[in-house]
Each structure stands twice: as structure tokens, then as C-alpha cells.
Image (tube, rainbow, N blue to C red):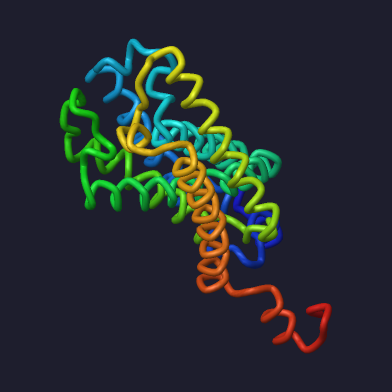
């Protein structure tokens, strides 16, 4: 049975560029993203190093935590596409509030630090990353999540202060986690942490949280640039209620 216009509108926010959930382009994006994420996880298993046998496994890395959250976001998104379930679609969008800015932060931090000094992110014992795997770890997740947000999602509804609080919780939660891993492993996943004292680490995590919150705001602005803004559309309609 053909999809009627009301059905299509129900599955598409007025400020959402393309139809989602849907079994078309939206499902294709989520399926391709999940295939890339699966490749990244398989790379960790088939190219083991001492992290594989340490406490916390590769989940000591912010990159892998972000990849896991991106995987959960796209898995829920694909299920929403297949089932046309609006609750799953809403859950995907809620997860995206954390996963998309986090992946933007990870991409920015990784490539910046690597450009400054690769030894800040790669310990001496770590084998070199395959270029394709490097891109799937540190490029594809942010590209996929931003694409999903800009073209297949409604605008973010999170305000600036809650966004900053969420970012601080993630940043300091990660700090607590890596300190727990260090207690067992006696090494940090990133050599950068070895070079910083406690005060400098606080600065690093606060700065990262602020950067993630700013990324949330920038993504919201970009969404408005691509899809328009509610206030503008209401103004064009002729009255304050958009009627």
C-alpha cells in the first residue's frame, strides 16, 4: 500500500530535511554506519595488543566509548527505520544529543593531538593503525552522526546549560573510569595523561566538556542552517502561532 502524504508528514518533523524513520535513505545511512562500526570493533579483536588483556579492554579509550555510543544510536535508528516506530526514533534522537557532539570532540582532539605529536595519543608499544581503520575509528562516526542529525533528525531541544552539564558528567565520568583502570593496569590508555599533573588534567577535562557543549550548539546552528528554524517559519506564516 502506498504511503499517503499525512503518513509521510507524521514521520517527518517540519524542520527535518529528509524522511526518517524510513526504509530508504535513512535506513541506508544507518546500515552503512553500523557496517563501518562493526569493522572497527572487528579490527580490535583481530589486531590485539596489550590493551586487549588489560582491565577495561579497549573501553579505556574515549574513542571506543564514543564508537559504542554511536553504534547504539545507529542500531536504534535502524530498528526505527525497519519498524517505523516513533518511540525508537525518539530514543535515537535522544542518544544523538550525546553521541554526535562526543564524536565531534573525539575527532577534533585526536587529529589535533596527532598533528602536534603522535606520541601524545600512541604509546610506544602500540602498533601503527591501518589508515582505513584509523579513518573508521576517528572520522566515520562523526561524519555519519552529523549527517544523520542534519538530514534525518529534528532539531536538538537541549538548552545550553543542560548541554554543558551533560558534557561535564561525561568528561569527569571518563576521568573516574580511566583512573580506576590505571589502578589495575598501572598505565594510562593515552600517553598524554602521563604528562599531566592533576591540575592540568582538570583543565583538560573541563576544556573538553566545554568543547563538547560548544559542539552541541554548533550542530544545532548547522541544523537550523540546513533545515530552517521554527521562529522563521512562524514569522513567514503571518502570525506568532504559525497559522
Write the residue at 41% across / 49% down.
142
Residue 11 picture location, percent across and down: 65, 54
Q: Quadrant of the C terminus?
A: bottom right
On screen, residue 168 versus residue 201, left or right, reads: right
With respect to residue 190, does 18 lie above or below? below
Q: Nearer the viewer, residue 135 or 192?
A: 192
On screen, residue 212 versus residue 124, left or right, reads: right
With respect to residue 179, does 34 lie above or below? below
With respect to residue 215, does 141 lie above or below? above
Residue 193 picture location, percent across and down: 37, 35
Write the residue at 47% across / 26% down.
178
Q: In the rendered image, which quarter is residue 173 located in? A: top right
Residue 43 picture location, percent across and down: 27, 25
Residue 86 picture location, percent across and down: 69, 44
Q: In the rendered image, which quarter is residue 133 located in? A: top left
Q: Nearer the viewer, residue 94 or 111?
A: 111
Q: Nearer the viewer, residue 232 or 162?
A: 162
With respect to residue 190, does 138 lie above or below? below
Write the residue at 62% across / 40% down.
169
On screen, residue 237 versus residue 135, left or right, reads: right
Amino acid at each position: 500500500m502506498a504511503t499517503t502524504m499525512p503518513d509521510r508528514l507524521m514521520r517527518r518533523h517540519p524542520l527535518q530535511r529528509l524522511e526518517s524513520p524510513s526504509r530508504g535513505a535513512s535506513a541506508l545511512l544507518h546500515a552503512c554506519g553500523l557496517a563501518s562500526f562493526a569493522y572497527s570493533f572487528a579490527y580490535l579483536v583481530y589486531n590485539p595488543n596489550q590493551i586487549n588483556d588489560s582491565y577495561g579492554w579497549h573501553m579505556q579509550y574515549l574513542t571506543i566509548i564514543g564508537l559504542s555510543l554511536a553504534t547504539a544510536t545507529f542500531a536504534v535508528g535502524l530498528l526505527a527505520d525497519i519498524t517505523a516506530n516513533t518511540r525508537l526514533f525518539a530514543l535515537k534522537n535522544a542518544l544523538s544529543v550525546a553521541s554526535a557532539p562526543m564524536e565531534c570532540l573525539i575527532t577534533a582532539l585526536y587529529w589535533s593531538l596527532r598533528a602536534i605529536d603522535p606520541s601524545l595519543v600512541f604509546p610506544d608499544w602500540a602498533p601503527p593503525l591501518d589508515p582505513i581503520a584509523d579513518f573508521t575509528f576517528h572520522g566515520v562516526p562523526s561524519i555519519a552522526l552529523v549527517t544523520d542529525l542534519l538530514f534525518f533528525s529534528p532539531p536538538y531541544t537541549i538548552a545550553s546549560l543542560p548541554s554543558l552539564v551533560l558534557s561535564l558528567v561525561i568528561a569527569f565520568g571518563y576521568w573516574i573510569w580511566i583512573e580506576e583502570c590505571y589502578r589495575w593496569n598501572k598505565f594510562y590508555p593515552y600517553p598524554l595523561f602521563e604528562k599531566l599533573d592533576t591540575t592540568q588534567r582538570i583543565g583538560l577535562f573541563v576544556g573538553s566538556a566545554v568543547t563538547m557543549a560548544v559542539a552541541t550548539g554548533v550542530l544545532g546552528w548547522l541544523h537550523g542552517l540546513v533545515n530552517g528554524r521554527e521562529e522563521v517559519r512562524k514569522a513567514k506564516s503571518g502570525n506568532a502561532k504559525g497559522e
